[in-house]
Image (cartoon, helix red, strand yellow):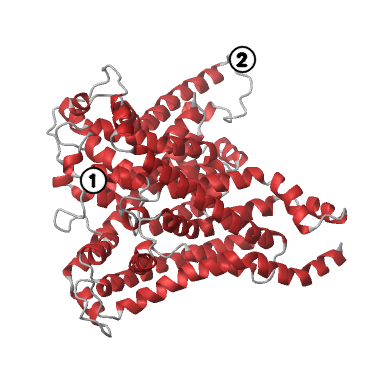
């Protein structure tokens, strides 16, 4: 209790050079917080770390007693690439995730623009209605979507998945863009208009460059959500259009228990998305909470 | 200035319409067509294995559904999954948010590591946990148990539901952490400092300042998680396939079994309608809350 009362405000302690008893206590407290924080973080991260490690083991080592000591090999990576045709699934994932994101952005940017800059009485209602479409549980509409897709030949096609993912993410994309556009100072657009810029010029030369970071993080969130989506991909694809989520699921069969290969494939499947996630974690909160937490 | 605004509005009506039309009409179709079809199918006798048996069934599908013990077992499982995962992630997420808000060495990196599981695709996290963590013979957990002289647990056969809950909680704890950490950033440091000056200990500060400040963010986390957790699917699909028996079959998985394994479209659709109604009860609260937020 005494230590916590004598400490100064964290974050304000700008001069760590001074060594009074007060800073001593603070440093001590920080040390323990550091130990605790890092322990928790490492425990949470451990399964991912272990998976990456297992990817560099041989199959025999992978199922042996857990051990940190082994000679790393790229065997599993090579085998996943050559035998399992990893590339095909990866390409499907890339095409579907980026395709649906581009499409969603194209549809959402004009809508978010008009909502942020030309609001009418109906804008708020429209936004909330869009949010409510996101509440429809996918499993509730699995049957009709499956049957529709079967009848028009969209089952197991990348086009089919792109359509589903675009619509799935559209509300989030509109919302997130809307919050970014709203944060933009109106005066700049006004000034542009005074100088005779038309709507199109205004959008291309003012709005897009100024909100590019926001658009980029919106796009990244959409890519992440599509990349990791595993309800529609498992139910609507089988062999041709299966993305990585479905490919990894094929390791669940009892005959297919190859831990090193599973780990190698999983590591490749999550690595790019993990980096995207790290890059956009802060902005992503807006999209995930529909602007309710910023 | 005024003139521009008014002229903007009259043309704005047209512009707004044309700019929003694609998004609105597509989403409208995406919502209404499958929804109408689900409701329609749920009132039909429609089984892909019995092409001859068609026609209006009235509420027959619902009658079968509600007298099917599997439905009630699935509802119970769904409730347990949602309840436990929410409890773990919200309590854990709040505590972790407080911890990671403190300053310590390498805080940024530790934070990133702790948030990472949220970005792992569900099929990967489920299989990594099942095979490499929870495997009774070669899993890390059984190795740790052995280290302490405890018997190894065969997670998926003796505690199937618990296992799924652990995996899903591991995925969603980082989500709660991420949202609550962001919310923590707007916590008024002066207020905390003032309380400390008045002799409030860390526990008092947590309960009387931090927690009330996080109240709204916590309710957002609860509602958003609920909507996703009501329909957990991939984690069950790749680990237990709903078994043993019906032990890990939730509502989503039951509908999947009825639709794509039993081909009973009518019954599955009735289940779908139930799922939609359940989700909407939660959704109403969430939408209301976001709406209130939009005003301010």
Residue A62 visible in rendering: yes
Which residue is found at the position 35% from the left and 46% from the top?
A245
Asked if labels 1 and 2 share a chain, the reply is: no
Q: Is residue B285 above or below residue B185?
A: below
Q: What secondary structure is found at the residue carrying circle 1? A: helix
**In whole angstroms, how far apart are the C-alphas of marks 1 and 2?**
51 Å
Residue A187 horizontal/vertical position (percent): 80, 52
Task: Please give the residue where the numbered disc 2 appears in the rendered image.
Answer: A18
Considering depth in this image, is B30 or B280 the residue closer to the camera? B30
Considering depth in this image, is A41 or B32 the residue closer to the camera? B32
Residue B221 horizontal/vertical position (percent): 45, 52
Task: Please give the residue where the numbered disc 1 appears in the rendered image.
Answer: B163
Considering depth in this image, is B280 or A11 the residue closer to the camera? B280
Considering depth in this image, is A222 or A92 the residue closer to the camera? A92
Q: Is residue B287 above or below residue A78?
A: below
Chain letter for the residue marked with disc 2 in the picture: A
Quadrant in which the N terminus of chain A is drawn: top left
Q: What secondary structure is found at the residue carrying circle 2? A: loop
Q: Residue furthest left?
A: B151
Chain letter for the residue marked with disc 1 in the picture: B
Q: Quick one: label 2, few (<14), some, or many (20+) residues within 10 Å?
A: few
Q: Residue B78 falls in which quadrant of the image?
A: bottom left
Residue B80 placement, left or right of A286: left
Residue A78 placement, left or right of B53: right
Residue B5 horizontal/vertical position (percent): 81, 65
């Amino acid at each position: 209790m005494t230590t916590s009362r004598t400490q100064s405000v964290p974050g304000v302690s700008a001069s760590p050079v001074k060594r009074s008893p007060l800073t001593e206590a603070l440093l001590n407290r920080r040390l323990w917080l550091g130990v605790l924080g890092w322990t928790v973080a490492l425990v949470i991260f451990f399964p991912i770390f272990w998976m990456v490690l297992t990817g560099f083991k041989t199959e025999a080592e992978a199922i042996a007693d857990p051990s940190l000591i082994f000679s790393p090999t790229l065997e599993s990576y090579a085998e996943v690439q050559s035998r399992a045709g990893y590339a095909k699934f990866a390409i499907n994932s890339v095409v579907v995730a980026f395709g649906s994101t581009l499409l969603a952005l194209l549809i959402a940017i004009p809508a978010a623009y008009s909502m942020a800059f030309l609001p009418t009485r109906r804008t708020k209602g429209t936004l909330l209605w869009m949010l409510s479409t996101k509440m429809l549980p996918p499993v509730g509409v699995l049957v009709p979507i499956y049957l529709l897709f079967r009848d028009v030949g969209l089952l197991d096609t990348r086009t089919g998945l792109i359509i589903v993912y675009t619509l799935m993410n559209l509300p989030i994309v509109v919302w997130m863009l809307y919050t970014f556009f709203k944060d933009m100072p109106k005066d700049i657009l006004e000034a542009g208009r005074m100088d005779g810029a038309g709507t199109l010029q205004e959008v291309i030369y003012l709005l897009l460059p100024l909100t590019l970071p926001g658009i980029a993080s919106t796009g990244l969130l959409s890519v992440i959500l599509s990349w990791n989506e595993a309800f529609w991909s498992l139910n609507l694809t089988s062999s041709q259009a299966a993305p990585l989520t479905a490919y990894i699921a094929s390791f669940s069969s009892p005959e297919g228990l190859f831990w090193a290969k599973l780990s190698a494939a999983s590591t490749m499947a999550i690595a790019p998305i993990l980096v995207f996630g790290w890059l956009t974690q802060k902005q992503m909160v807006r999209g995930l909470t529909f602007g309710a937490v910023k | 200035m005024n003139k521009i605004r008014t002229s903007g509005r009259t043309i704005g009506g047209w512009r707004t319409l044309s700019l929003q039309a694609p998004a609105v009409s597509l989403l409208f179709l995406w919502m209404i067509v499958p929804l109408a079809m689900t409701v329609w199918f749920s009132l039909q006798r429609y089984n892909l294995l019995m092409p001859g048996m068609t026609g209006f069934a009235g509420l027959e599908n619902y009658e079968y559904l509600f007298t099917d013990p599997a439905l009630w077992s699935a509802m119970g499982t769904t409730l347990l999954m949602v309840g436990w995962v929410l409890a773990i992630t919200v309590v854990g997420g709040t505590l972790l948010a407080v911890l990671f808000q403190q300053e310590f060495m390498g805080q940024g990196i530790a934070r990133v590591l702790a948030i990472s599981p949220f970005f792992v695709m569900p099929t990967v996290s489920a299989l990594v946990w099942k095979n490499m963590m929870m495997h009774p013979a070669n899993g890390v957990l059984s190795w740790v148990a052995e280290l302490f002289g405890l018997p190894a647990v065969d997670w998926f056969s003796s505690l199937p539901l618990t296992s799924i809950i652990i995996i899903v909680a591991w995925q969603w704890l980082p989500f709660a952490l991420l949202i609550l950490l962001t919310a923590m950033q707007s916590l008024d440091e002066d207020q905390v400092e003032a309380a400390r000056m008045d002799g409030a200990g860390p526990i008092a500060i947590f309960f009387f300042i931090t927690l009330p400040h996080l109240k709204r963010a916590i309710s957002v986390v609860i509602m958003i998680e609920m909507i996703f957790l009501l329909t957990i699917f991939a984690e069950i699909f790749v680990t237990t396939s709903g078994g043993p028996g019906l032990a890990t079959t939730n509502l989503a998985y039951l509908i999947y079994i009825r639709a794509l394994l039993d081909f009973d479209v009518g019954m599955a659709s009735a289940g779908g309608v139930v799922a939609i109604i359940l989700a909407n009860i939660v959704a109403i609260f969430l939408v209301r809350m976001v709406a209130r937020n939009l005003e301010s």
